[in-house]
Amino acid sequence: MSLRYLTAGETHGPQLTAIIEGLPSNLQLDFEELNFQLHRRQKGHGRGRRMQIEKDTANIVGGVRHGKTTGAPVALIVANNDWKHWTSVMNIEPIEGGDEEKRRVHRPRPGHADLNGGLKYNLKDLRNVLERSSARETAARVAVGAVARQFLSAFGIKVAGQVIRIGEIEAPANNLPIDDLIRITEESSVRVVDKETEEKMTAYIDEIKAEGDSIGGIVECIVEGVPIGLGSHVQYDRKLDGRIAQAVVSINAFKGCEIGIGFEAGSIKGSQVHDEILYTAERGYHRASNRLGGFEGGMTNGEPIVVRGVMKPIPTLYKPLQSVDIDTREAFTAQVERSDSCAVPAASVVMEHVVAWEVAKAFLEKFGGDSMEEIRANYNNYLAQLEQY
C-alpha cells in the first residue's frame, strides 16, 4: 500500500485533522518530538499575532497504541485555540445575519485564492475559500511530515533546513555537518547560521513591517543518509526529484523549486555541473561533488538531497492593494486579514516536512512491508546487494 495522507479543517474552525494511511506497524513514535516540530513551525521573526494565540500540539486519536503504530490509519488532530472567537462565524449550523454577515468577505485580496475559488465553487462569501486556502493548513502537513521524519530517523536519515535569503539579504554559504546545522539554525530567529546575517535580516523584516508591507525569500532543505535508488527513471511520476518539486511548490506562497545548483546549471558548462563518479572500499560508489543535489535520472545517488524553494511575499498586506467588490464590481482596497510580515523562517520548517514525507513515501515504495521489522530486513538486504555490486 502506498503511503498517503489527507487533511481537513479551516483556519478559524475547531481543528485541523490529518489521516495517514500506509504506515507500517511497530514504528515507535516520540510524541514530544512530534510536538517540537509543530512548535518550530510557529517560531521565527516576522510572525503575526496568530502565533501568540496558537500553541500547536498534535493529538493522535487513531492508529497508535502504547506508543507504536498498529498498521491502521493514523489520525491526528491539531486544535485551533482561536476557534472560541469564531464559533458563530464558523458554525456548521445554518444561521442568519449577525456575525456571519459581518464577517462576510466580498472584496477578494490580490495574490490569494479568494476570487479564483469564489468563481470556481460559485461562493459569494469568499471566507469559504480563504478559510481553507490559509497557510494554517501547513500545521497539519508538518504534523504528518513529523511522523514521516521519525520513520526516516529509524533508518539513520536526517533532515535539516535553513534560510538562504530574505528579500535582498542573502546568507553566506556554509558547509556545516548536518547535526551542527540543525542545532545552530534552531537557535536563530530567522534560521540562519551567520549571526551578522541574522541581525541584518531581523532589522530588514522590522523595516518592511513598519511600511505595512511583506517580504519573501529562499529556503533550503537537506536530507542526509538517503540510500542510492529511491525513485525511478522508468516513468515521469516515479521520479523522486519531480515529486519533491511538486510537494515544495504546493506549499502556500511557494513559487519555485530547484534541486542542487538548480537554475545556475543553465548558465555554466556541463563540466561545471555534473558530479564525477568515484569508488572506494569504505564508501562504495559515490560522487566527487554534489552539484545535482543527490539526484540523477530521477533517483537518489547516495549524496545528500539538497532542495531549495522560493517563497513570495505574503499577499495579505496592511497597506492593501486595489481589488474589486464582487457585490458592486466597483474598485476597493482589498480587505485585510491578520497576517505575518515575513514567514520565511517558518516556511523553512514546512518545507523540511513536505520533503521528508516524499522521501519516506519513496523509501516505503522501495523497501515496503507491513511492519518495521519487515522493512528493515528488506533494507538491509538491499544494502548488502549494493556492497556486492
Image (tube, rainbow, N blue to C red):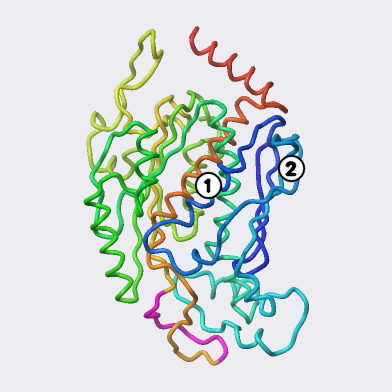
Q: Nearer the viewer, residue 335 or 249?
A: 335
Residue 28 is inside the magenta segment? no
Q: Residues within 10 Å of mark 2 (few under 14, many from 20)?
A: some
Q: Residue at x 37, y 19 (%)?
A: 286
Task: Residue 8: name its quadrant.
Answer: bottom right
* Of pointers 2 and 1, the one earlier in the residue sequence: 1
Is residue 147 shown left or right of residue 69?
left
Expressed as whole percent of the image width and height from the top left, the position of residue 107 reads 52, 83
Point out which mark residue 73 bears: 2
Expressed as whole percent of the image width and height from the top left, the position of residue 249 reads 47, 52
Vertical position of residue 152 compared to residue 168: above or below: above
Vertical position of residue 205 compared to residue 146: above or below: below
Going by the numbered disc 1, the residue's amino acid type is Phe
**Magenta segment, prevailing SS (helix, strand or loop):** loop
Vertical position of residue 83 compared to residue 266: above or below: below
Task: Residue 369: name its quadrant.
Answer: top right
Q: Nearer the viewer, residue 33 or 344?
A: 33
Tell me the SS state at disc 2.
loop
Q: Residues within 10 Å of mark 1 (few under 14, many from 20)?
A: some
Going by the numbered disc 2, the residue's amino acid type is Pro
Tell me the SS state at disc 1.
helix
Q: Residue at x 55, y 32 (%)?
A: 152
Expressed as whole percent of the image width and height from the top left, the position of residue 71 reads 74, 35
- Residue indicated by mark 1: 36
Q: Residue at x 35, y 33 (%)?
A: 292
Q: Quadrant of the N terminus?
A: top right
Give the magenta-colored segment's residue range: 317-327
Q: Nearer the viewer, residue 35 or 210?
A: 35
Mark 2–mark 1 distance (CA, rounded to whole Å): 22 Å
Is residue 44 shown left or right of residue 203?
right
Task: Residue 302: name its quadrant.
Answer: top left
